[in-house]
Image: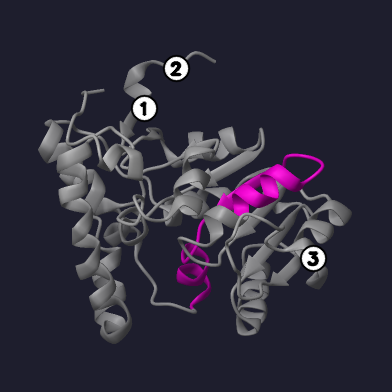
């Protein structure tokens, strides 16, 4: 399907798809790496090569960061809209192929996540076998060895159509890229991060209206200021990066070139 330039924006070298959650979910059924980069991780693009390469190699990149979207619209006098990982996941659980028992694998950060996630999925009418919920180890991103050979073997053995990575931004994207390159087939690899815990109750619930108004960060900060306040303050470092490089990739090579940019 041919898509016009209106369906995309290139921001910091990343080609962001602009579409509804329903369209994004349907597109994911073709397989591939789906990512929703947030501002706290995006600000690390110049320094974090593994994260940057994962985003550049993703099949679908969606503008999850409300801060990035607002700043882009102000800088470029544009009018793009955000698509959050939370809105995407809410739509994804309605997809027929996603609701089939045994057709998903859930990669979660803690053993406590297993029970609450399985319970929440059951409440949505989705029965996921215990074998299809995987508690992730602490990952090291070095690019030399498989990030998680056990997970690779599990996915290849169970062969689901959908793999949901909920282990947090900055780590799940390199993990998803590693899976994509090492698996013997191409499932849909959804990097939705904290969106899983918003819905299961492990983190503060974010109402639909708050998500639409780009206020998820505020709910998280008010609920746990010691954890999130500093994180979102540090995300402000994304603004000078965007003003300087706009649609260009701020790689170390690009950082030496100066603030040249072209509008897209």
For the residues labelled 1 and 3, the Cα–Cα distance comes to 36 Å
The residue tagged with tag 1: helix, strand or loop?
strand
Q: Nearer the viewer, residue 176 or 23?
A: 176
On whether residue 199 falls in the magenta region, the answer is yes
Q: Earlier in the sequence, mark 2 or mark 1?
A: 2
Q: Earlier in the sequence, mark 2 or mark 3?
A: 2
Is the C-beta separation of discs 2 and 3 under 8 Å?
no
For the residues labelled 2 and 1, the Cα–Cα distance comes to 9 Å
The residue tagged with tag 2: helix, strand or loop?
loop
Q: Which residues are magenta?
A: 176-201
- In this rendering, is residue 186 above or below 197? above
Q: Bin the neighbour count of mark 3 within 10 Å (Cα to Cα): few under 14, some 14-19, many 20 and up.
A: few
- In this rendering, is residue 17 above or below 7? below
- Residue 230, image x, y percentages: 24, 76
For the residues labelled 2 and 3, the Cα–Cα distance comes to 38 Å
- Residue at numbered disc 3: 150
Quadrant where the C terminus sits is: top left
Residue 116: quarter of image: bottom right
Quadrant where the N terminus sits is: top right
Q: Is residue 189 left or right of residue 17?
A: right
Q: Is residue 36 left or right of residue 101?
A: left
Asked whether residue 161 is in view, the answer is no
- Residue at numbered disc 1: 8
Q: Is residue 234 left or right of residue 179?
A: left
- In this rendering, is residue 59 above or below 190? above
Per the rendering, the mark at residue 122 is: none
Task: Please name which of the two marks, 2 or 3, marks the residue nearer to the observer.
Answer: 3
Is the C-beta separation of discs 2 and 1 under 8 Å?
yes
- Residue 91, image x, y percentages: 52, 48
Asked whether residue 36 is in view, the answer is yes
């Amino acid at each position: 399907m041919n898509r016009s330039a209106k369906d995309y924006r290139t921001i910091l070298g990343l080609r962001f798809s602009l579409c509804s959650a329903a369209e994004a979910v349907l597109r994911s059924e073709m397989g591939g790496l789906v990512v929703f980069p947030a501002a706290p991780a995006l600000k690390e693009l110049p320094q974090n090569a593994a994260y940057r390469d994962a985003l550049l190699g993703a099949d679908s990149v969606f503008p999850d960061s409300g801060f990035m979207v607002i700043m882009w619209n102000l800088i470029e006098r544009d009018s793009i809209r955000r698509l959050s990982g939370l809105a995407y996941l809410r739509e994804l659980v309605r997809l027929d192929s996603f609701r089939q028992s045994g057709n998903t694998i859930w990669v979660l950060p803690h053993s406590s996540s297993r029970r609450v996630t399985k319970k929440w999925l059951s409440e949505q009418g989705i029965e996921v076998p215990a074998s299809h919920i995987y508690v992730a180890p602490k990952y090291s991103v070095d690019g030399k060895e498989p990030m998680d050979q056990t997970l690779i073997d599990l996915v290849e053995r169970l062969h689901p159509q959908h793999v949901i990575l909920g282990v947090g931004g900055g780590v799940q994207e390199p993990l998803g890229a590693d899976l994509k390159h090492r698996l013997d087939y191409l499932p849909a690899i959804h990097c939705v991060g904290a969106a899983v815990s918003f819905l299961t109750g492990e983190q503060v619930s974010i109402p639909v209206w708050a998500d639409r108004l780009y206020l998820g960060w505020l709910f998280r900060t008010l609920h746990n200021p010691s954890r999130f306040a500093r994180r979102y303050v540090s995300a402000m470092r994304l603004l000078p990066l965007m003003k300087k490089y706009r649609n260009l990739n701020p790689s170390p090579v690009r950082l030496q070139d100066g603030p040249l940019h072209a509008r897209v």
